[in-house]
Amino acid sequence: MGMFSGMGSATRGYQSNVLKEGEYLVRIDSCEHFEAKNKGEGFKTTLTILNVLSGTNHRPGEVVNTVWLKKGEVQMWLGNIKGFIAGCLGVEDARVDETVATEVAGPNNPLKGQVTKVKAITRVSKKKDEKTGEFFNYTLYSWSAVLTPDELRAALPAEDLQRFFPSGI
């Protein structure tokens, strides 16, 4: 059984805590499965902020990494990965199974270099942090389907297209 075993029956999730509240146009620089000492398996995406559509927490050119670790409630981390993949591919959740997730995290990653919009909304948990006793924040993500080259040209000024895509789209 691989890291993404159970993906087909997972319910779409929307959580992470990397992108701060706002709406962004991002380029997916990489998606990968990894094995970390002392942390176990995980799924990591590296994103470059191309444009800030709303919010003031990030800036164009900033690189952020989202990491979902295989720990805790299986449904939760698989669901968050499913939400990312289904949203970016613009497909129904049922189409994202172990095979699709493995392909996305593999060497022929079909999302690498693609551009998508993501909306991040911060919420306060109903549970308290065991160490601090405080309620903690988490962020809900809504991923949009990747943009076509024409949509990307319409979304970014020419100088930003040249800056982020010097070899062309």
Image (tube, rainbow, N blue to C red):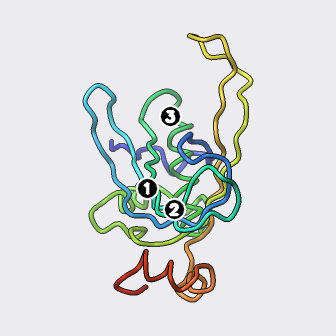
Residue 44 is situated, as x and y percent measured from the top left of the image, at 39, 48
Of all residues, the one furthest to the front in this rendering is: 159
Spatial distance from mark 1 to mark 3, Cα to Cα?
28 Å
What amino acid is at disc 2?
Ile
Give the residue drawn at x 43%, y 55%: 63
Spatial distance from mark 1 to mark 2, Cα to Cα?
6 Å
- Asked which quadrant contains residue 130, the reply is top right
Q: Please name the residue that numbered disc 2 is placed on.
A: 49
Residue sitting nearer the eye, 99 or 130: 130
Could you say whether the residue bearing mark 3 is in a helix, strand or loop? Answer: helix
Residue sitting nearer the eye, 83 or 60: 60
**Label 1 with label 2: CB-CB less than 8 Å:** yes
Is residue 72 left or right of 134 when viewed as pictured? Answer: left
Q: Earlier in the sequence, mark 1 or mark 2?
A: 2
State the mark number for residue 74.
3
Give the residue drawn at x 33%, y 37%: 41
Q: Earlier in the sequence, mark 1 or mark 3?
A: 1
Q: Please name the residue that numbered disc 1 is placed on.
A: 63
Is residue 35 left or right of 96 when viewed as pictured? Answer: left
**Label 1 with label 3: CB-CB less than 8 Å:** no
Q: Which dot, 3 or 2, sits closer to the camera? A: 2
